[in-house]
Image (cartoon, rainbow, N blue to C red):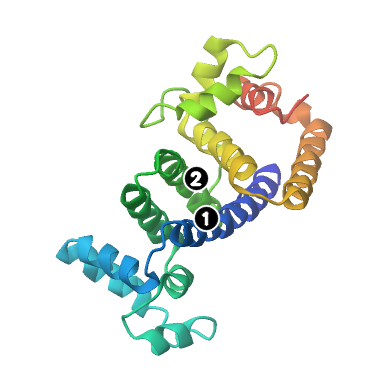
Amino acid sequence: MIDMRLRYRIVHMALDIEHHTKLQLLRMMDKFNEDGYQIVQDYMDSLSEVQRKNCDSEINRNKGNIYCGDIVDKYDGAYPIWAFIEIIPFGRLVAFYGFCADRFADKEMKNNFYRLLTCKEIRNASAHSNCILNDLKARTAAHKTNTAVTNELMMINDMNSNFRRNRMSNARIQQLVTLFYMHRTMVESDGIKKSESEEIQKVMKRIDRNYDYYSTNPMIKGTFDFANLKK
């Protein structure tokens, strides 16, 4: 039950992040006075033949879709950015974001791109109802934690550096904490952030009520302590 509730929050936060990723792309396009059609065409031209076929396949799957099929039909391959970002899956959105980060030579966007890649993993796992808390052993992460995320963790009082390093070497915890960080830094609405914080607190309280269930498992107990899911 705890895992299910955590997955719900992860998906909800990921949707918030996705929305604000799109907003940031549109604002950056305006900032650099980009042609909304040309930037998408340039992205498509940058793909290899196999990558282009994969992207076309992702878009064509939306043909006949009652929610966005009309967008595919209207533009028929010549998509402006404001249409393109509405008909591609999250993984493609992240890839396009990375392309734009390079195009604009924006270091913070590039850092966000790598963090979004990390968020994508736990977002997809949660959306497919995969168990999040069933493998919390150390040293499963494929890469080091993003520097900005690590720096944020270092600001937490009484956060032992060895404990932090050990926890963040677990891929699932690394992804979860990165998602929390991205929600706090990318989402601009204080109301949305406050609402999500309250929902996370509800999950924490439920864990508090059932903490004895997990206290004999040092991996889960340590993870709740680390993620501040247990005070």
Quick one: quadrant of the C terminus?
top right
Residue 14 vertical placement versus 61 (above, below): above
Q: Earlier in the sequence, mark 1 or mark 2?
A: 1
Residue drawn 77% across and 26% down?
212
Measure the alpha-carbon separation of dots 1 and 2: 17 Å
Q: Which residue is labeled 1 in the image?
A: 24
Residue drawn 65% across and 44% down?
3
Q: Does residue 108 appear to the left or right of 182 in the view shown?
A: left
**Kind of residue indicated by mark 1:** Gln
Residue 176 vertical placement versus 62 (above, below): above
In this orientation, does residue 137 appear?
no
**Kind of residue indicated by mark 2:** Cys
Q: Residues within 10 Å of mark 1 (few under 14, many from 20)?
A: some
Q: List x then y, in percent, for residue 100.
A: 36, 54
In this orientation, does residue 22 appear?
yes
Q: Nearer the viewer, residue 111 or 56?
A: 111
Q: Which residue is labeled 2 in the image?
A: 119
Q: Residue furthest left?
A: 49
Residue drawn 68% across and 23% down?
225
Residue drawn 41% across and 30% down?
141
Q: List x then y, in percent, for residue 182.
A: 57, 42
Q: Does residue 126 appear to the left or right of 70 in the view shown?
A: right
Quarter occupied by residue 129 = bottom right
Q: List x then y, in percent, for residue 170.
A: 48, 28
